[in-house]
């Protein structure tokens, strides 16, 4: 393109890093505190960021949890869901796991690309 700068917004860059693969630089906003808390709780019981794109695998890990890890994570999930309307009473299972992962992986990012041969000029 014959423009000095191209900007874009990526809706799910963790799941589909298309814009980064195209050479753009990502600037992700800080995740919300309640997202960070749930991500840390998931990590504490063995569910890492790389697992978040596979709801079935995450559900298998959750189903395998024993007390007290299962109770610890359940409390964190309920806390996370408090502000999610009717979803706050979702029963544990695949549907709830898919919903949670959809919320946790939906982290929009701003992308920018600078043309290597064109300078930015201001009027």
Image (cartoon, helix red, strand yellow):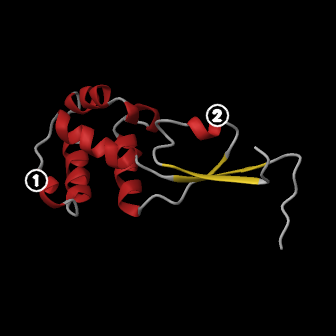
Residue at the location (39% across, 36% down)?
52
Residue 103 location in percent, x, y? 33, 49
Mark 2 to mark 1: distance in Å?
39 Å
Residue at the location (46% across, 48% down)?
11
Tell me which corner region of the image, top left, top right, bottom left or bottom right, holds residue 79. Answer: bottom left
Residue at the location (15% across, 35% down)?
93
Dot 2 corresponds to which residue?
21
- In the rendered image, the vertical position of residue 103 relative to residue 120, given as above or below: above
Residue 30 bears which disc, if any?
none
Residue at the location (34% across, 51% down)?
38
Q: Secondary structure at mark 1?
A: helix
Residue 47 location in percent, x, y? 37, 35
- In the rendered image, the vertical position of residue 54 relative to residue 35, given as above or below: above
Identify which residue, 42 or 56, lies in the foreground.
Answer: 56
Identify which residue, 23 or 5, lies in the foreground.
Answer: 5
Identify which residue, 18 or 103, lies in the foreground.
Answer: 18
Residue 114 location in percent, x, y? 77, 51
Residue 89 bears which disc, if any?
1
Q: Quadrant of the N terminus?
A: top right
**Nearest to N terminus: mark 2 or mark 1:** 2
- All told, the count of numbered labels is 2
The 10 Å Cα crowd at callout 2, few under 14, some 14 to 19, many 20 or more, is: few
In the figure, is residue 88 to the left or right of 30? left
The 10 Å Cα crowd at callout 1, few under 14, some 14 to 19, many 20 or more, is: few
For the question of whether residue 69 can be seen, the reply is no
């Amino acid at each position: 393109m014959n423009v000095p700068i191209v900007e874009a917004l990526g809706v799910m860059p963790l799941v589909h890093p298309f814009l980064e693969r195209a050479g753009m630089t990502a600037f992700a906003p800080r995740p919300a505190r309640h997202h960070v808390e749930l991500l840390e709780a998931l990590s504490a019981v063995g569910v890492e960021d790389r697992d978040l794109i596979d709801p079935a695998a995450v559900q298998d890990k959750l189903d395998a949890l024993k007390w007290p890890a299962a109770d610890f994570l359940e409390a964190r999930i309920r806390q996370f869901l408090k502000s999610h309307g009717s979803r706050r009473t979702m029963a544990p299972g695949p549907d709830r796991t898919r919903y949670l992962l959809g919320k946790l992986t939906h982290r929009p990012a701003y992308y920018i690309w600078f043309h290597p041969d064109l300078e930015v000029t201001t009027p």
